[in-house]
């Protein structure tokens, strides 16, 4: 029988992800689990490749990564942000085990992201002729350490609420994926993009992000727009530059 990974590599990418997602928690049962995890890892290997390709391409067309646009009294904001690309640290598998022990299973898509990609932060300044600002909503995904830090805060509030200490119910644990498009630029905005845990499935909805899609579908959107998914609502789409950015990116 043809495996899910073989089908994925043969081009049935979206269909394979849809079928595995439809299995729900049964994706954790062997022999499916090992095959599904291989699909997730291959998908994120492709995502990492695309990120590594896009960084120099964006720079070549005049995109400036980083926070040079901050006012002097805002400089400390930059110190708390991930690098443009931060590969997984050597202990990442230990951190994944730690997080899953604390809260339960991660969707395989997010687990494979942490294992294979790590963190990314495309925040910067686009060329003036693009006429875009923070609404470009650049690709940005926190490292797993941010998830563990958020869990510690959530657990403190949850414990107080459960004990009746007048704390508000924090609701389910929401793993931070990225700031919203305003907060990426140190502007007051809304809820950060997140995934509710635990989730034993293949993929999960990315919540508070306007496209209302799963994590993997969101990554597909990001790469379709050269790492700047907000361009889909930009008044002027820089078509030649976009074609140059996205040329030969690996499909997820």
Image: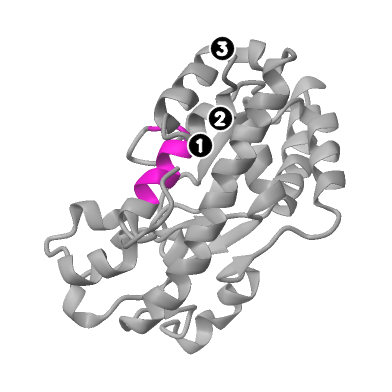
- Which residue matches tag 1? 9
- Which residue matches tag 2? 6
Residue depicted at x 45% and y 82%: 70
Q: Does 24 sit above or below residue 66?
A: above
Circle on res. 117: none
Q: Quadrant of the N terminus?
A: top right
Q: Residue furthest left?
A: 235
User: What span is in magenta?
Assistant: 213-222
Taking the image as shown, residue 92 lies to the left or right of residue 112, namely right
Marks 1 & 2, CB-CB < 8 Å contact: yes
- Is residue 204 visible from the viewing direction of this image? no
Quadrant of the image occupied by residue 158? top right
Distance, label 1 to label 2, CA atoms, is: 5 Å
Q: Residue furthest bottom?
A: 72
Foreground disc of the pair 1, 3 = 1
- Is residue 239 visible from the viewing direction of this image? yes
Q: Main secondary structure of the magenta part?
A: helix
- Does residue 219 belong to the magenta stretch? yes
**10 Å crowding of disc 1: few (<14), some (14-19), many (20+):** some
Image location (x, y in percent) of residue 236: 12, 65
Taking the image as shown, residue 130 lies to the left or right of residue 155, namely left
Which of the two labelled residues, at mark 2 and mark 3, occupies the earlier sequence position?
2
Marks 1 & 3, CB-CB < 8 Å contact: no
Distance, label 2 to label 3, CA atoms, is: 18 Å
Image location (x, y in percent) of residue 184: 46, 62
Image location (x, y in percent) of residue 209: 40, 41
- Which residue matches tag 3? 23
């Amino acid at each position: 029988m043809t495996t899910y990974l073989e089908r994925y590599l043969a081009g049935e990418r979206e269909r394979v992800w849809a079928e595995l997602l439809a299995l729900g928690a049964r994706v954790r049962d062997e022999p499916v689990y090992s095959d599904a995890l291989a699909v997730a890892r291959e998908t994120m290997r492709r995502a990492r490749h695309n990120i590594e390709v896009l960084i120099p391409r964006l720079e070549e067309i005049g995109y400036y990564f980083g926070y040079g646009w901050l006012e002097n009294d805002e400089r400390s904001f930059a110190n708390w942000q991930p690098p443009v690309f931060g590969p997984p640290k050597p202990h990442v598998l230990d951190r994944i085990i730690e997080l899953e022990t604390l809260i339960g299973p991660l969707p395989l898509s997010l687990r494979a992201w942490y294992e294979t990609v790590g963190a990314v932060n495309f925040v910067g300044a686009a060329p003036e002729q693009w006429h875009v600002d923070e609404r470009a909503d650049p690709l940005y995904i926190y490292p797993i350490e941010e998830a563990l830090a958020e869990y510690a805060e959530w657990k403190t509030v949850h414990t107080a609420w459960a004990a009746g200490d007048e704390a508000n119910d924090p609701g389910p644990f929401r793993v931070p994926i990225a700031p919203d498009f305003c907060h990426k630029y140190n502007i007051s905005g809304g809820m950060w993009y997140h995934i509710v845990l635990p989730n034993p499935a293949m993929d999960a909805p990315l919540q508070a992000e306007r496209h209302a899609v799963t994590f993997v579908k969101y990554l597909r959107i990001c790469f379709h727009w050269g790492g700047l998914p907000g361009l889909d609502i930009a008044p002027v789409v820089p078509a030649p530059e976009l074609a140059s950015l996205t040329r030969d990116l690996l499909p997820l």
